[in-house]
Amino acid sequence: MSTIRVLLVDDHEVVRSGYHRLLENTADIKVVAEASSGEEAYLAYTKYQPEVVIMDLSMPGIGGLEAIRKIRSYDKNAKVLVFSVHENDIFLNRTLEEGVLGYITKRSAAKVMVEAVSQVAQGKMYIGSEMQPLLVKERGNNNPVLATLSPREFEVFLLLAEGKSVIEIADILNLSSKTVGHHYTSVKNKLNVGNAAELTRLAIREKLVEP
């Protein structure tokens, strides 16, 4: 089998270093680039054209979900493997909707990452064992209301829950403040909440952000 060229994306240098060594200890995998943010990930993808992107979700800036969306808009055949601390069906379903082929958790990544990369490189789905039971759950089952958010609204919701202002979100997502404001209003209406503090409490309750 030819060498699998990988882009490794995580905002923690120590984490990247550990997985870089793990992957390069495998004869047929080579890490051709690393990135510490969604913006860097997109630029690295366009430059290096890797076979597989290993993508963290929680990062500064546009974050993993938006980075996946941008990469797959640039190349609809991009193969993405998510590795994340998030172990819930909301993130699993959102990433699958964006076209990722794999999802493993950081809890088990050291044991399964090499196999997952190999499977995803072949265009096969790889879902970590702790995430597999969530596949049988109906989309958004934990909170059906969250399932009503569009991909962009979900991204704005997460950034608001992390304490970002409308102006900051506009800058991160490269949108106008007016557009973000419309999304904010729509999110509040759909989720039946009155302000950003209530959005944050909802996101913490659903284990989408850290308290």
Image: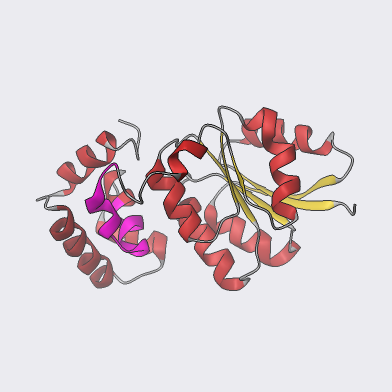
Q: Is residue 88 above or below residue 72?
A: above
The location of residue 117, given as percent across then percent down, is 72, 45
Please give left or right for residue 192 compared with residue 147 in the image: left
Residue 91 part of the magenta segment: no
- Which quadrant holds the C terminus? top left
The location of residue 78, given as percent across then percent down, is 65, 63
Q: Is residue 22 above or below residue 93?
A: above
Q: Residue at x 73, y 64 (%)?
A: 49
Residue 156 part of the magenta segment: yes
The residue sitting at the front extreme is: 136
Q: Residue at x 40, y 59 (%)?
A: 172
Q: Main secondary structure of the magenta part?
A: helix
Residue bounds of the magenta highlight: 142-157
Q: Nearer the viewer, residue 167 or 200?
A: 200
Q: Residue at x 16, y 56 (%)?
A: 188
The residue sitting at the left extreme is: 194
The location of residue 71, given as percent across then percent down, is 58, 65
Colour setup of the view: secondary structure
Please give left or right for residue 44 compared with residue 12 in the image: right
Q: Nearer the viewer, residue 70 or 148?
A: 148
| Res 74 → quadrant | bottom right
The location of residue 68, given as percent across then percent down, is 53, 59
Q: Is residue 111 above or below residue 209?
A: above
